[in-house]
Image (tube, rainbow, N blue to C red):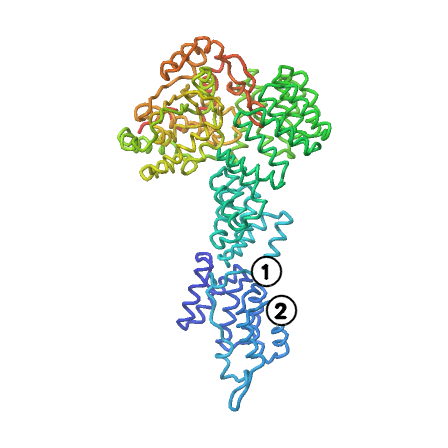
Amino acid sequence: MTTSTSALSVKESLRKALEHFQGGDFQAALGCYQGVLASDPEHPTANHNVGAIALKLNRPMDALGYFNRALKGDPGNDQHWVSLVQTLVVTNQSKLAETMLEQAKKHGVAEEAIGRIEAVVHPIHTIGTKTPSDKENQDELVLPELELGTQEHRFAPEQQLKDLRRLVTKNRLNKAEKKAREIIERYPSDPRFHEILGHCLFMKEHYDQACQSFETAVSLDADKLSYLQNLAKTYAAQSKYDLAVAAYKRAQTLAPDNTALLLPLGNALYECFRLEDAMGIYENMLKQNIQTLQALIQLGVCHQKQHRYEDAKRFFNSAIQLAPNDPTPYSYLAALMIQLNEYQSAIDAFDTILAKVPDNVTSLQSLALTYIRMGAPEKAVAPLRRAMAAAPTSAMNYQLLADAAPFGSDSDAFKALLKLTESAQASDHERAVAQFVAGGIYFEEKNDEAAFATYHQGNALVHKDRQAKPGMYNTAKKITRTMDRRFFNIRRPMGSALDQPLFISGMPRSGKSLLEKLVAQSPDVSAARELKNLQDMLPGRGDGVYLLNHAQSITRRELTQNSQSLLRALQGSTSSKARYISETTPKNTIMSYYAQMFPNAPVIFCDRDPWDLMATCYFKYFASAHNYSFAIATLEEQITAEKMLMAHWLEALPNPCLKITYEDLVRTPRQVGRQLADFLGISWEDSYGDSLQADSDSLDTVPQAHAILSLDHNAAPVPLSDEFIGVGERFKEYFLPYISTETPFTRQD
């Protein structure tokens, strides 16, 4: 009776079959193997072992068929050659056995196995010895030991590797991934297939899984350069740049003369805020005349990051002189000119690109954005029309057009936008952006029902790929129980004695950027804004659950190293020598770690009405992070957890703390400015508050173009307005059906 493999893994079935065989129960062993073959008729180990049992039961002709299938399925297993040839000899097929012997030699079968085959095909007989066809000697001669089907044979056949690479080359990634997993099940110690699996997963942007595959490949063969390169590349794709640096440096120890490692290593160092180290790499590339164009551009970027704008301009211009027909260096120069508000120079750079590549959509969109920034939106329409013709499924075109020449829901442009939301040719991302743009237009027209429905559809599209797990509130409760005042009193001596940086914490849309802009008007404060990748420098990539679970194991050395890295990053972001450098990255969920690094640094918490947070976050397409915002239930839980944590930190942190509300900041900036000055002890003029303007992205309409384009320096200023105070109440009735708790933003514990 055949044993089903539905309840047993293949590996377990093979193990049980071997136990039955060793116990003399051949029929039970056959049942297990046939169960494996029922789900995978080509399984080499099962076929081989059924053949071996057939020999034991004196059925050599039956055995031949199974051994043939075993060899076909796994020609890299030498035992399969031995078993087949021995059985051919036993069944008096000597000529075929000779042929198979020659094929085995050509296939690269090991010398020991070839010797065993030759001993059967060309036996040396002495007086009194028996021929291989003597029946009584059959078991001793041809009965092989059963295979375990585990890691006994490390490397899969070369043909399987070639077939799999062919699938990858043809971009049949799903089939290649499935096949790679099947082969890994049989050959878990063959690193080549882990690498190919990792490649398939990387191309599908499943970076966490790809990372695991490449890490496995490296663990199996630490001396293979491509494994380390792919691992480093995947770390970088996950923004784990410190790990990418370590992997690239390990790769350099294997291949110190491999110049292809220099640029990605330099870029990873840059992302870790190790600007001087990165610049050293790029300068070395220039000396060796290696990827000179990229080195010049990256040196320009490093100088721009450090506010050495003339040096940055010099390197970008050198890149242009080196490659006058390449649009890339012109793009970097244009971005720098926009940052410096030198709009005409930026327009000249974009015009140069478009003269060379007339349908360069990014340049057309960037040119339009530049006209909008400089206060000439009517000039943005023409390049946008060209961008629409070149890229009809780009929602960014409509988003910019809404800024340049606002259109209503009864316009032809809006009808075209709605068609884009349903276009089969557009990606989910483009369709989602189109939904958010359309929602913003309904919002401006105060068509609340249509606005909410459209935003809701846009969030649903994003949520398909960026789902957030519920449970933030329970995590926040654990944080408050674990990290109380007693916890910080014990940990405080391990932190830095400095009374800086200035941390500004709060949810998105709570006024963090606006508050930083206000406080940075004092000459004593320099704004670093929200530094990219800063959170990734923390243990566990700044994950709140990780920091909670490892709260007691964080060492003084670790705190010192990370605080120094953070300070280096902040200082590299500004050329100012101000007393404070402000930073808005810290979230309430990870504020505990910042407090352990800098227990004397001031912390300002930004708060806002929860319903206003709900509406303004849900109506905003966050290009990255904040995945909780795309579903109403997880957004409500996040707001509840963040507010509970804020109240806890105000009581528990050793740091000097202050809470500012969005409502006060917008309505009375002069009074808030004086409050900040008294709290920080900085020089202040009341006129600072009077002249405060918000970035356009600080308001809560549609997601602004500069939030999606990479030209987000000095977003266009707009007057402060309190029109978005109370917006949550306006949409409350639409949110409530999607919230399970009867009392939103509170919990009865």
From the viewer's perspective, is residue 398 above or below residue 227? above
Q: Residue at x 48, y 49 (%)?
A: 215
From the viewer's perspective, is residue 484 above or below residue 26? above
Residue 78 is situated, as x and y percent measured from the top left of the image, at 54, 68
Say whether residue 292 is left or right of residue 580.
right
Quadrant of the frame with the C terminus: top left
Q: Residue at x 31, y 32 (%)?
A: 483
Which residue is under mark 2?
106
Label drawn at residue 158: 1
Marks 2 and 1, how far apart at CA = 13 Å
Q: Residue at x 51, y 18 (%)?
A: 699
10 Å crowding of disc 1: few (<14), some (14-19), many (20+)? few
Judging depth in this view, the residue of 739 and 553 nearest the camera is 553
**Are circles 2 and 1 on residues that touch, CB within 8 Å?**
no
Q: Amino acid at mark 1?
A: Glu
Q: Residue furthest bottom?
A: 127
Judging depth in this view, the residue of 686 and 414 nearest the camera is 686
Residue 214 is situated, as x and y percent measured from the top left of the image, at 51, 48
Number of numbered discs on residues: 2
From the viewer's perspective, is residue 453 above or below residue 20? above
Marks 2 and 1, the one that precedes in the sequence: 2
Secondary element under disc 1, as helix, strand or loop, is helix
10 Å crowding of disc 2: few (<14), some (14-19), many (20+)? few
Residue 125 is situated, as x and y percent measured from the top left of the image, at 54, 86
* Quarter where residue 415 is shown: top right
Q: Amino acid at mark 2?
A: Lys
Say whether residue 240 is left or right of residue 434.
left
Residue 447 is situated, as x and y percent measured from the top left of the image, at 55, 17
Secondary element under disc 2, as helix, strand or loop, is helix
